[in-house]
Image (cartoon, helix red, strand yellow):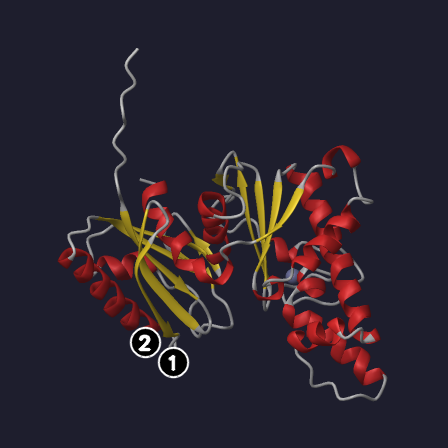
């Protein structure tokens, strides 16, 4: 039998990651190579300023691709907030980006570009990036948690994102793990986010320090620094965080029977020791048949890769 070589076709996509503080954009190949990239601060004035900036970025990237004879497969966007994937519209924005609710990115971009446009939530595209090029490469049943100001989630089952009716599913940070817990801004009590997000790590430390009459001007970064110096209050806060995170993860394992849980976001950056603490904790929790053998891994792409995941959409969904 003669083996035929299948010619690998290079595809290029524009990827844009829209966050509260910066917008990162680039041209990415389907081998994961970043060909061109650019980072700009997110305009503070709100929607019209952001849309104008997106237009100039997209036109610049399209021109660059044309000059370099790179055929483009489309424009992929990952943005904070809830996104109607099918309409390309931000349904419920984030307080970090002003006036972002209801903006239809696909319709807006169609007024100046003929390329197909895909818009998704930033953690969904992180899950895509991890499963294609990162820590979840080769896995089909993946849960991704991004621990930052809040907690975002992405679920891949059978290698595909689980979206729900319009794409709003996998709000994993708003899974309640305590009926009597702290009130969350979503309206529930005791959400995973109120245990393990940067905002709440800082809040819990502030509460404990206030009780002791200590200065309560501390950020989550301070809590991690103090923890590394064996500060007893920081130790209490981190143990509370790991406990909550472990409960959340065991719930997710019971529900979805995943192969791997990827932990990313600013809170997790380079902190392999949190992964190890969680791993140790969950090994004594929940249903053994499901919990044993689940891998917990640190995101490999994390902050650098928002636009890589965003660009991936342009060839994954073709
Ligand atoms: Zn909530």
Marks 1 and 2, how far apart at CA: 6 Å
Residue 8 rendering spot, x and y as whole percentages:
28, 35
Residue 256 rendering spot, x and y as whole percentages:
64, 38
Question: Which image quadrant: the C terminus?
Answer: top left
Can residue 212 be seen here? yes
Answer with left or right where residue 157 lies relative to residue 97.
right
The quarter holding residue 317 reads top left
Residue occupying image coordinates x 38% and y 80%: 45
Q: Residues within 10 Å of mark 1 (few under 14, many from 20)?
A: few
Residue 158 rendering spot, x and y as whole percentages:
52, 33
Residue 57's disc is none
Circle 1 is placed at which residue position? 45
For the residues labelled 1 and 2, say whether their Cβ atoms are less than 8 Å apart: yes
Q: Is residue 268 above or below residue 279?
A: below
Answer with left or right where residue 185 lies relative to residue 314.
right
Q: Is mark 1 within 8 Å of ligand 1?
A: no
Can residue 112 be seen here? no
Circle 2 is placed at which residue position? 49
Answer with left or right where residue 68 lies relative to residue 203.
left
The quarter holding residue 189 reads bottom right
């Amino acid at each position: 039998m003669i083996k035929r070589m299948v010619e690998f076709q290079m595809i290029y996509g524009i990827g844009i990651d829209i966050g509260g503080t910066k917008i990162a954009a680039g041209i990415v190949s389907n081998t994961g190579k970043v060909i061109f990239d650019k980072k700009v601060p997110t305009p503070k004035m709100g929607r019209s300023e952001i849309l104008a900036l997106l237009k100039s970025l997209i036109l610049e990237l399209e021109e660059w691709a044309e000059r370099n004879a790179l055929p483009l497969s489309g424009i992929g966007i990952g943005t904070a907030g809830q996104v109607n994937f099918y309409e390309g519209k931000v349904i419920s924005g984030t307080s970090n980006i002003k006036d972002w609710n209801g903006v239809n990115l696909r319709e807006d971009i169609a007024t100046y570009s003929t390329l197909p446009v895909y818009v998704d939530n930033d953690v969904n595209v992180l899950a895509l990036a991890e499963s294609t090029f990162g820590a979840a490469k080769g896995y089909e049943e993946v849960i991704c948690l991004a621990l930052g100001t809040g907690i975002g989630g992405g679920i891949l089952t059978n290698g595909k994102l689980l979206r729900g009716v319009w794409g709003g599913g996998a709000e994993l940070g708003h899974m309640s793990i305590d009926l009597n817990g702290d009130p969350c801004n979503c309206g529930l009590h005791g959400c995973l986010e109120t245990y393990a997000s940067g905002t709440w790590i800082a809040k819990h430390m502030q509460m404990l320090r206030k009780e002791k009459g200590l200065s309560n001007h501390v950020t989550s970064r301070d809590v991690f620094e103090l923890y590394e110096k064996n500060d007893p209050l920081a130790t209490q806060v981190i143990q509370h965080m790991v406990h909550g995170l472990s409960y959340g993860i065991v719930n997710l394992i019971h529900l979805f029977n995943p192969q791997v849980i990827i932990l990313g976001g600013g809170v997790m950056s380079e902190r392999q020791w949190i992964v190890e603490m969680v791993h140790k904790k969950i090994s004594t929790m929940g249903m053994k048949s499901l919990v044993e053998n689940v891998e917990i891994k640190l995101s490999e792409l994390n902050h650098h890769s928002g636009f890589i995941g965003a660009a991936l959409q342009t060839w994954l969904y073709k």
